[in-house]
Amino acid sequence: MPPGAAMPPGMPPGGPVAPGKGGRQRKGRKARAVAVAGAAAVAVVAAGAVAAVALGGEGEPAKKKPTPTVSAPPPAWTVALGRRLKSGTGLRYDGAMTLKGRPVQAHIRVTPAGAASGRIVAGALAADVVAIDGTTYLKAGLAFWRDFAGEIAHPEYYADRWSKAPASVPGFDVPDVLGPDAIAAALRKTSGEPPTENVNGIRAYRVRTSAADYLVAAAAPYRLLAVRVAGQNAPRLTAAPVAAPATLFTELRPRVAALGGAPDPNLAFRPGTLTFRNCDQNTNGCTVSLPATLTAPQGSVPDGARAALRASISSRGEPLGSCRASAPVQADRSVVLRCTVTSRLWRDWMQKALDHPGSYPYEAAARVNGEALDPADVPELLARLDRERKAVLKPDPATSAPSGTQGPSAERTDGPEVAASRSPGRS
């Protein structure tokens, strides 16, 4: 494509864009830039609502207004169980789901505050899972992304690193469905006596919500037995207290520490023109600038949406260095990303060009992806996790609960977790 040429109509995201402007090192020196944008396909599901309006005709008797009623308070056991879940050692979930028509085993442990760590396994393929601050992330190989997130363009951008989980993987929202806070909130909305059924030989209440059904033992100490997430092929999980909270926090911390800059496959961008800044005869570095526009999802910009730039510079096929940068997406869906290559390769190459005049062309390649977590936010997440660990592991005899109540200090040992093999039963 000649310099300055516009992108041909219909060229997909991820294709080349117009060359950037490169400064001449000496007379006759050329500089070229090529930008490549990564874009991910996103499935957006819009839910429509139909409102029924009743109009009274002339001569028809006016309908009496319903007498306001006061909702009955939730049963005492729901309040007590919700309190124990949020102040206990956390919850362990084990079970199965169907993803893309294939059976998948899930093993997840969740802290009282809703942070989670675990693993999902589909035959020879597996993915590690971590959730923090209401967001779920995956780390899996390229084969896993191709098999279970094939609708996403350029799965290689997300493989083998922590990436935000697409809506289709792992198939449920860990913090908002499996977190103790979410379960306690669902229990508080219970009124009367819920329906019961048999769960592996135990009579259990079934607390129904739009997100999941929670199965709770119908006799004291009212233990959470299982969770059936809503939706076709959704997980059916057994539930039990975390027996070794210390090992859970030990696993969680390094995973959270590695989340900075995790890409978000749910965001897609259209790149503008890539340009160079302050590169000519500059041995200290070369800055690459690229504007971009958010193209998916449609509608308003998602809260906290960020874009990340990855750029590299080369000369005649020889790498000169790379750089990264990220920034929040503005309300008008635009963002301008800049990063500076300061590698020794660039410094040595530029010094050679200055010492030995001649033709030294250079070019850049770049791509723009969504970013799920600003690296600057990671220290606060770790501090929050450390505070929770200290609170959970602190011995508190006054609040100790008998074994099996899912209460605080119930089973705080450092022994290994044992995954349950039975799926939640049905009556």
Image (tube, rainbow, N blue to C red):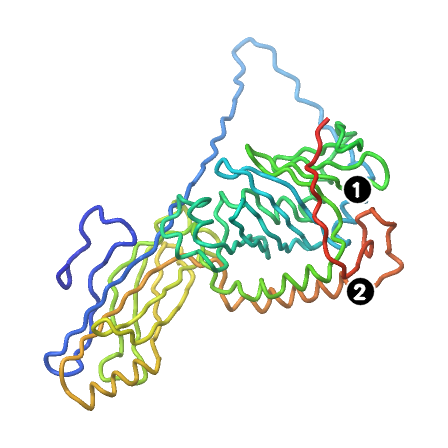
Q: Residues within 10 Å of mark 2 (few under 14, many from 20)?
A: few
The relative height of residue 232 versus residue 307 in the rendered view (above or below) is: above
| Residue denoted by label 2 | 394
Q: Residue 157 sits in which quadrant?
A: bottom left
| Identity, as a three-letter code, of the amino acid under mark 2 | Lys
Residue 414 locus on image (x, y percent): 76, 61
Q: Residue 258 sits in which quadrant?
A: bottom right
Q: Residues within 10 Å of mark 1 (few under 14, many from 20)?
A: many
* Circle 2: element type: loop
Residue 119 locus on image (x, y percent): 59, 51
**Left or right: where does residue 126 sit relative to residue 272?**
right
**Left or right: where does residue 68 sit relative to residue 157?**
right
**Left or right: where does residue 317 sit relative to residue 137?**
left
Q: Residue furthest bottom?
A: 355
The C terminus - image quarter: top right
| Identity, as a three-letter code, of the amino acid under mark 1 | Arg
Q: For the residues marked 1 and 2, what is the alpha-carbon distance in whole angstroms?
A: 23 Å
User: Which of the two labelled residues, at mark 1 and mark 2, occupies the earlier sequence position?
Assistant: 1
Q: Which mark is residue 204?
A: none
Residue at left offset 67%, top offset 52%: 109
The N terminus - image quarter: bottom left
